[in-house]
Amino acid sequence: MNKDALKWVLIVEDDKRQSESLSKMVQSVAERINVLTAVNHREALEIARREHIDLFFLDIDLEDHENGYELAEHLRKESKYELTWMVFLTINPKYELKAYKKVHCYEYVMKPYKKEYIQTLVERLLFPPNTKVEQSRQSFIMVEIEHLQVKIFVNEIIFVEARGRSVEIVTVRGVYTANYTPLKKIVNLLACETAFIKTHRSFVVNVNYIESIRKVTNKQYEVHFINGGRFALLSVKHKEAIERRLLENNG
């Protein structure tokens, strides 16, 4: 990826004042951003098919016969937008769960939003400081959650825990519970991802999120993560392997 290349952002917003305001916020981040705008589905799809958009800002509450969420569904069917960043803008929390689980948006922003937040968001998505992170976001796994096939980006997974007949996939967005799914199935889905390592019979962790390892007993340790949330278990059996992996990463 050429980080100096022109970035294309499409804002779909039917309120002219808000569209102009958001355009200025996005454009102020960098000169090499080209901002396009649309007021409805037809215009948005025409632009998206003509250009190659790097980031979408979609207003949920459009006035035409379809809302922004439905537009996102149409865009996801386009092969070139299967993994493109999408940010929803709305005053309505109604579609938030569906937006994350089915369309896999990056953010669901409630109006009114702050200029600094939008600028930080654009900078993070279009100009990531580590190109490895940008590349890893292309990887995802499909997991059945409550009878829906949910796309979960690999670089957002912190760890996976087996709980009885289910697994919990802990991500930066929240926790996904896959019922009647063995841990081995998730391990197989992540088999090609070098960031993941087994730490315990019930845990697989992403080494990129590890903050520290703490001793609990002579035979068991806890793995704590940079997000400060839940921790994973580490058994003596797997301790040497994970310490070696962390040493390789730091080196």
Image (tube, grey):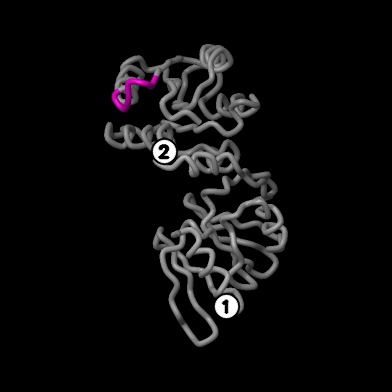
- Please tell me which residue is depicted at 56% across the width and 24% down the height of the picture: 71
Tell me the amino acid under the disc marked 2: Pro
Residue 60 visible to an observer of this rendering: no
Q: Which residue is mark 1?
A: 235
46 and 222: which is toward the camera: 222
Q: Quadrant of residue 165?
A: bottom right
Residue 209 position, x and y percent, is 46, 58
User: Residue 123 in magenta?
Assistant: no
Q: Is residue 34 left or right of residue 119?
A: right
User: Residue 32 in magenta?
Assistant: yes
Tell me the amino acid under the disc marked 1: Ser
Residue 59 position, x and y percent, is 44, 26
- Please tell me which residue is depicted at 55% across the width and 62% down the height of the picture: 205
Please state, as top left, top right, bottom left or bottom right, where the C terminus lies in the image. bottom left
Residue 37 position, x and y percent, is 43, 15
Q: Is residue 203 left or right of residue 126?
A: right
- Please tell me which residue is depicted at 39% across the width and 40% down the height of the picture: 129
Q: Quadrant of residue 163?
A: bottom right
Q: Is residue 55 above or below residue 250?
A: above
Residue 121 position, x and y percent, is 37, 36
- Part of the protein shown in magenta: 28-33
Q: Quadrant of residue 66?
A: top right
Q: Secondary structure at mark 2?
A: loop
Residue that extends furthest to the bottom in the rendered view of this protein: 218
Q: Which residue is mark 2?
A: 128
Q: Secondary structure at mark 1?
A: strand
Q: Is residue 99 above or below residue 74?
A: below
